């Protein structure tokens, strides 16, 4: 992804049309379609192997469907992937963290590719997700839950119109799950959109999300 691209667009409307995707001889996405507007959240559910992660990766252009297309504001996202990528934040199972950098250094470089973040902003984001006390530790020394909190600090710092979240509450305790709920609520309140893939119950603040269930 060219995350420095200056042609970032505002995602006012995201649409998937009849997405069909195979992995080998397995038909994973079977005519998936939906429309999502500003301030809306779509929860993607399904059993393990139903294609939740595959759908998110297809939506952001990392996988190419055999049939169907993804539209942003009525335009096929593959017509200008750099611009589309500049308007989204994709948080997968594993956060894009470097093991031999500290939590703070990771955020500085990860988010710094997209926008300038002053030290005070980094400190505030780390404190908000409960990472302030150990933000100078190398990521390889952190627990899975602590790494997820660093990733959430990245969400707090990145004001992308579209969030694609894959199991965002994984490895988090009850307090961490509340942080996820608060961040998602703020994203929707400012007119952003969210597609979240999870088989777990969403935090109470965003349980009004529409649900798309994928069949195995």
Image (cartoon, rainbow, N blue to C red):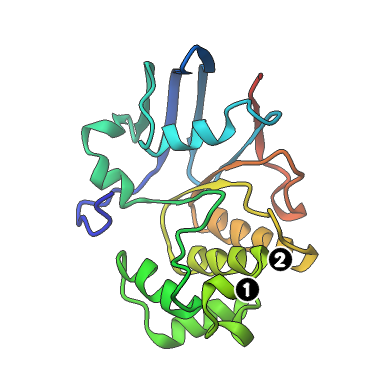
Residue 159, image quadrant = bottom left
The crowd level at tag 1 (other Cα within 10 Å; few <14, some 14-19, many 20+) is many
Tell me which label, 1 or 2, sits earlier in the chain.
1
Tell me, for residue 49, which label it has, or none: none
Please give left or right for residue 176 compared with residue 94 in the image.
right
Q: Nearer the viewer, residue 127 or 26?
A: 26
Q: Is residue 31 above or below residue 94?
A: above
Q: Residue at x 49, y 37 (%)?
A: 56
Whole-percent x, y for residue 13 in the image: 41, 37
The crowd level at tag 2 (other Cα within 10 Å; few <14, some 14-19, many 20+) is many
Task: Say what secondary structure mark 2 lies in.
Answer: helix
User: Number of callouts in the render?
Assistant: 2
Whole-percent x, y for residue 154 in the image: 48, 66
Q: CA distance from mark 1 to mark 2?
A: 7 Å
Q: Is residue 30 above or below residue 155?
A: above
Q: Quarter of the image containing the C terminus?
A: top right
Q: Is residue 207 above or below residue 189?
A: above
Q: Is residue 56 above or below residue 25?
A: below
Whole-percent x, y for residue 14 in the image: 43, 35
Q: Which residue is mark 1?
A: 129
Residue 183, image quadrant = bottom right
- Contact (Cβ within 8 Å) of mark 1 with mark 2: yes
Task: Say what secondary structure mark 1 lies in.
Answer: loop
Tell me, for residue 176, which label it has, or none: 2
Whole-percent x, y for residue 71 in the image: 36, 30
Q: Residue at x 41, y 86 (%)?
A: 119
Q: Residue at x 43, y 29 (%)?
A: 15
Farthest-out residue, right: 174
């Amino acid at each position: 992804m060219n995350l420095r691209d200056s042609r970032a667009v505002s995602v006012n409307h995201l649409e998937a049309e009849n997405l069909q995707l195979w992995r080998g001889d397995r038909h994973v996405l079977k005519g998936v379609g939906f429309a999502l507007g500003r301030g809306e959240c779509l929860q993607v559910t399904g059993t393990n192997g139903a294609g939740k992660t595959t759908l998110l990766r297809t939506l952001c252009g990392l996988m190419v469907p055999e049939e169907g297309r993804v539209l942003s504001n009525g335009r096929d996202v593959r017509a200008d992937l750099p611009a589309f990528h500049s308007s989204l934040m994709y948080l997968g199972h594993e956060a894009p963290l470097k093991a031999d950098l500290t939590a703070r250094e990771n955020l500085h470089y990860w988010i710094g590719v997209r926008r300038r973040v002053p030290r005070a902003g980094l400190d505030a984001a780390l404190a908000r997700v409960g990472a302030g006390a150990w933000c100078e530790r190398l990521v390889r020394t952190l627990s899975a839950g602590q790494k997820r909190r660093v990733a959430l600090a990245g969400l707090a710092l990145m004001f992308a119109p579209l969030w694609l979240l894959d199991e965002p509450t994984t490895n988090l305790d009850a307090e961490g799950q509340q942080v996820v709920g608060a961040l998602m609520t703020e994203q929707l309140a400012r007119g952003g959109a969210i597609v979240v893939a999870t088989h777990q119950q969403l935090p109470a603040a965003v349980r009004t999300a529409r649900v798309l269930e994928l069949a195995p």
